[in-house]
Amino acid sequence: MTSTLRPAPAKRAAPPGAAARRRRRGARFLSPPWWFAAPALAIYALVVLYPSLSGIVYAFTDWNGLGERSFNGLANFSKLFDDEAARGSLVNTLLLTVAIVLVQNAVGLLLALGVHAKIKSRTVLRVVFFAPAVVSPVMVAFLWKYIYNPSPDAGLNGILGAVGLGGLRQDWLGNPDLAIWSIAGMVVWQFAGYSMVIFLAGLEGVPAELHEAAMIDGASRWQRFRHVTWPLLAPAVTINLMLSTIGGLKLFDQVYAATNGGPGHASETLSTVLYKQAFVFGNYGYSTAIALVLALFVAAVSMIQIHYLRGREVA
Amino acid sequence: MTSSYGTAALSRRGFLGLTGGVAAMGALAACGGTSGGSSGGGGGGGATLRLVAVADQQKPLELLLKEYTKSKFSASYAPTDQVQTSVRTQLGAGNAPDVHVVFPGDGSAMSMAQIAQAGLLADLSDQAWTKRIPPGLKPAFQKDGKTFLYSAGSSVIGAIYNKKVFQEAGVEPPTTWSEFLDVCEKIKKKGKVPIALGAQTQWVTQLITYALVPSTVYAKNPKFDEQMRAGSASFANSGWKDAFDMYLELQKRGYFNDNPNGTTLEQQTSMVATGKAAMAIQVSAVLPDFRKAASNADDLDMFPVPGADDANQVWVPAGVVVGLGVSARGKNVDEAKAFLEFLGQQQNMNRWAEAVACVPLTRDSASKIDPVLKSFLPFIDANKAVPFMDQNWPNAEIQPAHFAVVQELLGGRTTVAKALAKLDETYRKK
Amino acid sequence: MNIRYGLRTLGLELVMIAVAVAFLFPVYALVTMSLKDQKQVAESPLALPSSPTFDNFSNAWTRAELGPALFNSTVITVGSLVALIAIGSFAAYFLSRRASRLGYGLYVLFLLGIVLPFQLGMIPLFKLVDEAGLLGTMQGMIIFYTGIQLPFTIFLYTGFIRALPADYANAALIDGAGHFQAFTRVVFPLLRPITGTVLILNAVFIWNDFFTPLLYLGGSTRETVPVRIFAFVGQYVSDNGLVFAGLVLAALPILAVFLVLQRYVIKGFASGLKG
């Protein structure tokens, strides 16, 4: 594996002198010119950076989203730290994120390995596992409300009863202690195939020769996975872990459509609180403050993750 | 290394095809844009007006837009939450659709009072139909004496019941609270669910409170809303406590289905429509879907929920249905207002009301009132009807707080006293 | 891989098929409800339809006017995808090969785009689109999706380009090719698996996105498929049969693209990369 984005080792290691200059010029000769990134940067700045930066202003105002606004300093932020509902939603958000990151990626990896093997139905199965990801999350939640019907002879409960697991029947979305886990189950079902596709892209990049060589060397299946496949899957693992973490921390559509944060506030997440403050309660300034804190929080988690995961990739 | 060039030749074609695609798509999108531009950009004269409404308004609006020839409209409909989000954003950014959905009264982020306060709704007061708004309903339409909302009428909250199940249990629609409990008991003995409750769908949680509060609060004290605003009344020391107690009594006696907090509106609908449950306390606006789900639409009827033991003390909730407003800052204010004036004509109000099963704002001989709503008319005509409670609430947080405390009450996670304290606290915010 | 189709593979095949059946249950629920009228759904939503009806599908097609909406959705999705892949792959290549603080800083800046909640810039962006006269146009949507999905695209590409040996491109450069040629002729073809992934994942997002087209295209003639379908989801009355049928219709093109893409990626791997 090759170059890293870490602050140029060449620069630090290079001794002064003609040889170094030549090497540096060599590196520059080999690295792509800046205009490769220019169009991307321009569109990104226009559509994401500029609007987001100008939106931050609202976090320091009492704007209701419609009328006049005046600056209120850090009042929104101090309100946030006293807001019990927001604190409760933080705990829910973290629990949901951990569950989704672990289960979705584990299932996604197993599915990817399964349909990467030379089984006859692999193309069809890939489509099957990916199919849930193709339906909009809001409608998936709507659909799952039929499956999570609490009556003992309907939906998932009906199936559990029919296969002799009647003892596991639940009030899936109505039980406040269970609701977020039911939502997590729904999200994992929908996005395991999504993770699978990214793992597959990694697996497609593992050269078959390496496997063959390992087989000739007499490596067991597990050894081949552990020492050949897994290290080469590193980029896919990084991408999947980060995307599912960010997705979990920002999870909104599924929660909003499945429970709207209920019963009571049992399944409220940071994003549902943010949304309600902005568009249901009309506290736009306060909601922007929440959005800002959420962004900083997610950014911090992502930076730690990428630091750790990419370090692992290079090693 | 050389071999990589071998594959490259092939894929270069692929890449060029791709970049060629960019140009082609750009061109396509560009011509798409020119023809669509007129509808998006607005402008004077014969422009196409933008209209954004909630899905529940699609049926009447499609009907009436087809007949309206003075201006051309391009309409979009969407679920309530999404419309609320997108129109709030557009209002905040200063370019709202010419005509858009507005909720009556106060108490929600898209309500007439909150948008009009920011000066974003055009004044409709000079239109003829506004003179016919019944005095009791004026707060839903007007702020500071000016009319900012168009709405075709009122819907009521009551018990939608399955006549067959009532017949089997040998019961008739009750007129007092104790009769109501008797009816439930008899149905329960027959092995049916007396009241289907789909409290998983959050707005459904409020309906039983709303059905009872007119009798437990407003029949005794019609000035309750003013006193609340003035700070001299509270939820905790009012008939709201009785209403919550009665709500929970129904649950304690086993008159609801199991797990109401996990049961959705769709499941509630199907229980009543298929006769597994006898009734659902619901807003009349859901009638069309209840009927479509029933094997025979005529099996369904509706009666006012008697929230008092003296039939004369029974009042009913009747709220103005979701309506439309004109964006004050739009480029086509006059054309948009002309459309609302058209909707305000009596025959068009009648048609809108018929399409959504509500009682028209004003009635004439041609008004067709849904037969199941007839039992509510005496209450409305005797001024024993109260707007839905949230329409008079001063901020948009109280209604969601009500949803949450009802779910917590049904789940046994809070007490009536704590629930009322929470509502009072939320009412006093800001 | 020259593994013979033995008992082990057969066992794996059977297990995977069993998992697929369990996975498909909600999909079955969706399809079965799309084939029922509201009476049948009320009777038993998830049983097989007693008398299947295709009314929902014809209603979805005519009443929801899915035909023109499909055209709009296709133009917006394909346009955005082409721009995303062209612009995103170049940028990702630059970011992966530029071993400097600037390169890393830019990379982190792009990553920020995945992290930011969309609400933050929503109102300023709407003003911008409005002022540019792009409300109600498909170009506006293509620019929007390109900008909003670039971070994700660059993130996926960079991860995989970093794992790719630089030798191929370097050899081409030493042989006298320009950077543009080295990338388009040598590197881009090697990115086939990840390009397929970038394409399908972005396609799913753009195709399904409901809120943005409602915000920017609402009340225009350029509405996309989800906007047309969701017009039938009311608070009090919904046409669920039509909505489910519409969703099935909307999912089919994406699934077809995915199927073709998988074939292409698998074949591409078997024949192309080994060389």
Image (spheres, coloured by chain):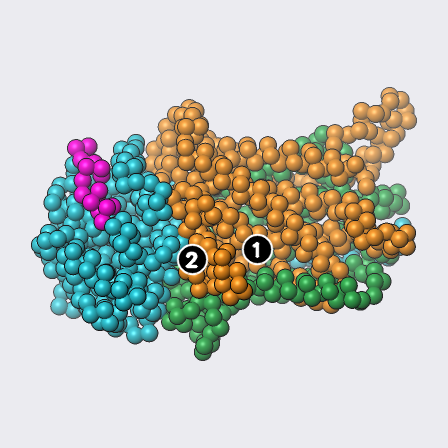
Q: Is residue A92 visible?
A: yes
| Chain B, hue in figure | cyan
Q: Going 30% across and 65% down the picture, which residue do you hit? A: B192
The residue that mark 1 highlights is A189
> Horizontal placement of A232 versus B346: left or right?
right
**Residue A135, percent across and down?**
54, 59
> Is residue B237 found inside the magenta-colored segment of the image?
yes
Q: Secondary structure at mark 1?
A: helix
Q: Going 80% across and 67% down the picture, which residue do you hit? A: C6
> Horizontal placement of C53 versus A36: left or right?
left
Q: Going 49% across and 40% down the picture, which residue do you hit? A: A92
Give the residue type that dot 2 points to.
Answer: Pro
Mark 1, residues whose alpha carbon is within 10 Å: few (<14), some, or many (≥20)?
many
**Residue B400, percent across and down?**
34, 44
Which quarter shows the C terminus of chain C? bottom right
Q: What number is the disc on residue A150?
A: 2
The chain letter for the residue carrying disc 2 is A
Single out the residue that lies furthest toward the top.
A16
Nearest the eye: A18 or A173: A173
Nearest the eye: A214 or B95: A214
Rendered image quadrant of residue A296? top right
> Horizontal placement of B162 versus C69: left or right?
left
Q: Secondary structure at mark 2?
A: loop
Start-end of magenta stretch: B231-247
Nearest the eye: C50 or A168: A168
| Chain C, hue in figure | green
**Residue B66, percent across and down?**
32, 67
| Chain A, hue in figure | orange
Give the residue type that dot 1 points to.
Answer: Trp
Numbered marks: total: 2
Q: What number is the disc on residue A238?
A: none
